[in-house]
Amino acid sequence: MARTETDLKSAIANLEQILDSGASTVTIDGETTVFNLAHVESRLRSLKAELATVQGKKPRRNIFNGINLS
């Protein structure tokens, strides 16, 4: 079942909230959650691309390519 535009926007907002907080570990009522911020950023890009597809927009290419010099 394909996700709706509303579902995608909600998921994007949740991920952006995690990134905006800058915290990688959160403890609420003794429950600790650890976020991998690199994975969150990757998932956010994926959801934004999926949202653009649902909205009928052309997929955008990266302006810059990442180069690993190690």
Image (tube, grey):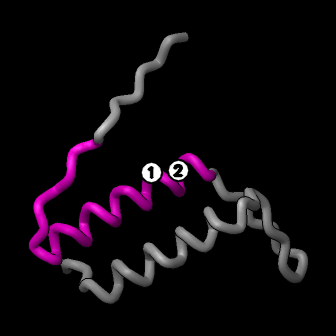
- The boundaries of the magenta stretch are 37-62
Q: Is residue 3 above or below residue 67?
A: below
Report how far apart the C-alphas of labels 1 and 2 lie in the structure. Answer: 5 Å
**Which image quarter holds the N terminus?**
bottom left
Q: Nearer the viewer, residue 31 or 63?
A: 63
Three-letter amino acid code of the residue under disc 1: Ser
Secondary element type, mark 2: helix
55 in magenta = yes
Residue 26 picture quarter: bottom right
Q: Circle 1 — which element?
A: helix
User: From the viewer's perspective, is 30 left or right of 22?
Assistant: right
**What residue is drawn where x is 49% and y is 78%?**
13
Q: Residue at x 55, y 10 (%)?
A: 70
Mark 1 and 2 residues: CB-CB less than 8 Å, in contact? yes
The kind of secondary structure the magenta stretch mainly shows is helix
Q: Along the line of sight, which residue is nearer the eye, 42 or 62?
A: 62
Q: Residues within 10 Å of mark 2 (few under 14, many from 20)?
A: few
Q: Position of residue 29 (x, y in %)?
A: 88, 82
Farthest bottom residue in view:
6
Q: Position of residue 66 (x, y in %)?
A: 40, 28
Going by the numbered disc 2, the residue's amino acid type is His
Label 1: few (<14), some (14–19) or many (≥20) C-alpha neighbours in 10 Å: few
Picture coordinates of residue 39, whole percent (x, y): 52, 50
Q: Can you identify the residue that label 2 sits on?
A: 39
- In the image, 33: left or right of 1? right
Taking the spot 43% from the left edge, 61% from the top edge, the residue there is 44
Residue 27 part of the magenta segment: no
* Residue 50, percent from left and from top: 24, 66
Q: Which mark is residue 42?
A: 1
